[in-house]
């Protein structure tokens, strides 16, 4: 869990520096910075999505995942969590929920979060998570400087999400394949790209509702493995 803990600390420390920096930035400067961040996030998402091996599976994953997410209102629930935290701390910054949700999604749905946590859980290798911690710490400075206090609290989401993957890594090892991990990461990268579009305010995409799409490739390959086993028995 050392990689996860370092990642959480990096976001909290980076976010704190960002809040200090926030006081000296004009609204115009913040806007330009966020445009740069938005473009960067889109490029990162595109680069990861290009590793997809089955475009059809990606489309199916996004459609089914979006349907599930919309039916159970995942994005609305995330917004409510952010607003509850905001009210608990009597924070008057209306951007708290946005900062919390956006940062949580960016830090949690990327390929490094998934693959890095699996590596840590399966063989104790935290290298990828350490690298992610550095990147997240730097981006936390920028996010907190423009989106405010909510970014720091996204570290809690990272602790829960990545920690769960690490702890479950050993149990799910027999069912994992390189292709499955690649497809899950690629779908996650598509969502990263969508976050970049939201940051640039090109169009609002309900990324929160699309989160179940990440699980669809894993379910698909799991069912395929089960089918092969059953066919082998018969």
Image: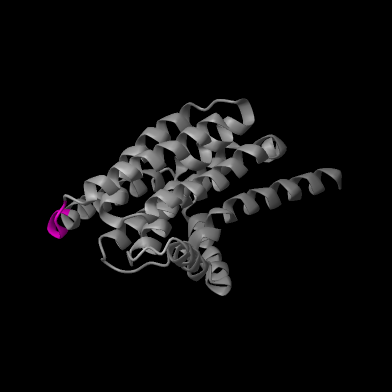
Does residue 36 appear left or right of residue 71 in this picture? Answer: left
Above or below for 226 versus 202: above
Instruction: Determine if the magenta segment contains residue 174.
Output: no
Going 55% across and 37% down the picture, which residue do you hit?
Answer: 117
Quarter assignment of residue 18? top left
In the rendering, at what x and y percent does residue 19 appear?
Answer: 29, 48
Q: Is residue 55 visible?
A: yes
Above or below for 65 versus 1: below
Which image quadrant: the N terminus? top right
Residue interval drawn in magenta: 25-29
Q: Is residue 176 visible?
A: no
In the rendering, at what x and y percent does residue 16 appear?
Answer: 34, 44
Does residue 160 appear left or right of residue 94 in this picture? Answer: right
Query: For the stretch drawn in magenta, what is the main secondary structure?
Result: helix
Instruction: Determine if the magenta segment contains residue 26.
Output: yes
Q: Residue furthest front?
A: 90
Q: Which residue is at the front of the view, 139 or 109?
A: 139
Above or below for 171 versus 191: above
Above or below for 206 versus 165: below
In the rendering, at what x and y percent does residue 172 appear?
Answer: 69, 40
State how many labels appear: 0
Quarter assignment of residue 101? bottom left
């Amino acid at each position: 869990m050392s990689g996860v803990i370092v990642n959480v600390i990096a976001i909290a420390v980076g976010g704190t520096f960002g809040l200090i920096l926030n006081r000296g930035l004009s609204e115009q400067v913040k806007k330009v910075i966020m445009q740069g961040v938005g473009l960067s996030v889109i490029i990162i998402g595109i680069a990861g999505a290009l590793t997809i091996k089955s475009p059809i599976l990606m489309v199916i994953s996004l459609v089914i995942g979006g349907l599930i997410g919309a039916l159970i209102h995942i994005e609305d629930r995330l917004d409510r969590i952010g607003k509850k935290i905001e009210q608990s701390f009597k924070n008057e910054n209306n951007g708290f929920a946005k900062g919390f949700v956006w940062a949580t999604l960016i830090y949690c749905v990327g390929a490094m979060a998934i693959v890095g946590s699996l590596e840590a859980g399966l063989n104790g290798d935290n290298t990828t998570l350490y690298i992610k911690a550095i990147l997240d710490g730097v981006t936390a400075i920028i996010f907190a400087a423009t989106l405010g206090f909510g970014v720091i609290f996204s570290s809690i989401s990272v602790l829960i999400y990545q920690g769960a993957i690490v702890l479950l890594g050993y149990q799910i090892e027999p069912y994992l394949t390189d292709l499955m991990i690649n497809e899950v990461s690629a779908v996650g990268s598509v969502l990263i790209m969508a976050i970049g579009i939201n940051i640039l305010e090109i169009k609002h995409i309900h990324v929160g509702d699309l989160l179940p799409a990440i699980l669809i490739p894993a379910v698909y390959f799991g069912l395929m493995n089960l089918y092969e086993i059953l066919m082998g028995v018969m």
